[in-house]
């Protein structure tokens, strides 16, 4: 019996050692794969969703809330948040002030583009925004249908409000619907992740 135990002992030991060695080799690869995936960021029932393939953000011909034409593009080396909102949207009343707070928060803040999708009536839009704390937020109107056209190709409006994150390479990385807390630790981790992706 002792001889059998001695024989099985080394076999089990070798097997255990081989499994441990394989596991230790797998860990760095798994860590690398995990590091290449963005951290979890949630808002209510939705979470940040990665999009593939990553399309370049198109130039958008918009108007500001005073009727002046502007061309909006992603700046190389900067993160851009492209937010779509509507005057009928209750959650937008929470989301827009959060984005305005993010815009005023710190020097490494992302560029933020907030686009009204449901109205071209500047008075109505200004009245809607007037009741919110959004002084630091660049709000635009889709007066020429450019954002709507881009939304069918690049930005799918699967909810309202919805915010797309454009990475430092100018490519759309993902989106989150609803009114997430961009100033939370999870929001800061997501932004930092994409800053470092370069």
Image (cartoon, rainbow, N blue to C red):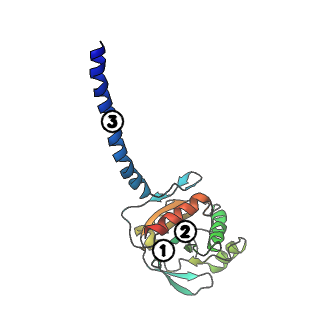
Q: Is residue 168 left or right of residue 130?
A: left
The answer to whether mark 2 and mark 1 are in CB contact below 8 A is yes
Give the labeled residue for mark 1.
147
Residue 159 appears in the picture as rendered: no
Few, some or many C-alpha atoms within 10 Å of disc 1 (few <14, some 14-19, many ≥20)? many
Q: CA distance from mark 3 to mark 1?
A: 58 Å
Question: Residue 12: x, y in percent?
Answer: 31, 27
Q: Is residue 142 left or right of residue 169?
A: right
Q: Which residue is disc 3 drawn over?
A: 17
- Mark 2 or mark 3: name the one nearer the start of the chain: 3
Q: Of helix, strand and loop, which one carries label 3?
A: helix
Number of on-image labels: 3
The residue beneath circle 2 is: 84
Q: Quadrant of residue 162?
A: bottom right
- Name the front one of labels 3 and 1: 3
**Which residue occupies 52% across, 81% down?**
62
Residue drawn 39% across and 47% down?
A: 27
Q: Of all residues shown, which one is farthest toward the bottom? A: 68
Q: Tell me the SS state at disc 1.
A: helix
Q: Nearer the viewer, mark 2 or mark 3?
A: 3
The crowd level at tag 2 (other Cα within 10 Å; few <14, some 14-19, many 20+) is many
């Amino acid at each position: 019996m002792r001889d059998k135990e001695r024989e099985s002992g080394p076999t089990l030991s070798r097997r255990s050692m081989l499994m441990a060695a394989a596991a230790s080799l797998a860990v760095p690869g798994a860590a690398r794969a995990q590091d290449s995936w963005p951290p979890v960021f949630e808002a209510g029932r939705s979470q940040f969703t990665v999009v593939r393939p990553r399309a370049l953000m198109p130039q958008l011909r918009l108007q500001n809330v005073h009727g002046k034409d502007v061309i909006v593009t992603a700046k190389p080396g900067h993160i851009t948040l492209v937010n779509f909102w509507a005057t009928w949207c209750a959650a937008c009343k929470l989301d827009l002030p959060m984005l305005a707070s993010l815009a005023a928060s710190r020097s490494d803040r992302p560029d933020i583009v907030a686009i009204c999708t449901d109205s071209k009536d500047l008075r109505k839009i200004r009245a809607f925004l007037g009741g919110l704390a959004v002084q630091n937020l660049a709000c635009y109107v889709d007066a020429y249908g450019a954002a709507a056209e881009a939304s069918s190709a690049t930005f799918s409006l699967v909810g309202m409000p919805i915010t797309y994150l454009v990475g430092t390479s100018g490519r759309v990385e993902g989106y989150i619907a609803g009114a997430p807390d961009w100033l939370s630790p999870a929001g800061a981790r997501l932004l930092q992740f994409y800053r470092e992706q370069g």
